[in-house]
Image (cartoon, grey):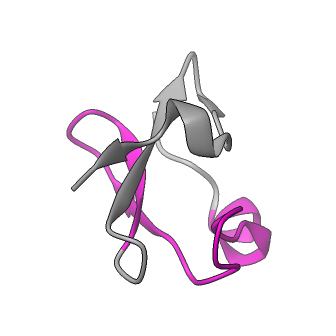
Amino acid sequence: MTISPQLLAILVCPKCKGELTYRDAGPALDCPACKLRYPVRDDIPVMLVDEASPL
């Protein structure tokens, strides 16, 4: 399942407040500015810096 475009439009990186891109393989949300990947578990984005992994 993918994240809705409306949700993706309002989600920002919790660290830098930058734009996120959805990555279906994984699934995850990537922040190109911070070079962090936030996991999506059970269709819920985990927007915690401590849970993010490096790109």
Is residue 33 placed above or below 21 in the rendered structure? Answer: below
Which quarter of the picture shows residue 18? bottom right
* Residue appearing at x 51%, y 72% in the figure: 20
Kindly indicate the quadrant of the structure image that contains residue 29: bottom left
Residue, far top: 42
Residues shaded magenta: 5-31
Q: How many marks?
A: 0
Q: Position of residue 2 (x, y in %)?
A: 47, 44
Residue at 64% x, 78% y: name it: 16
**40 and 53: which is toward the camera:** 53
In the image, is residue 55 above or below residue 9? above
Please determine whether, in this image, residue 29 is positioned above or below residue 42: below
* Residue 37 coordinates in the image, percent (x, y): 38, 50
Tell me what residue is drawn at x 27 percent, y 50 percent: 54
Give me the residue at 21% from left, 56% from top: 55
Q: Is residue 20 magenta?
A: yes
* Residue 39 in the image, given as x and y percentages of width and height: 46, 34
Image x and y of residue 5, in percent: 63, 68
Left or right of residue 48: residue 3 = left
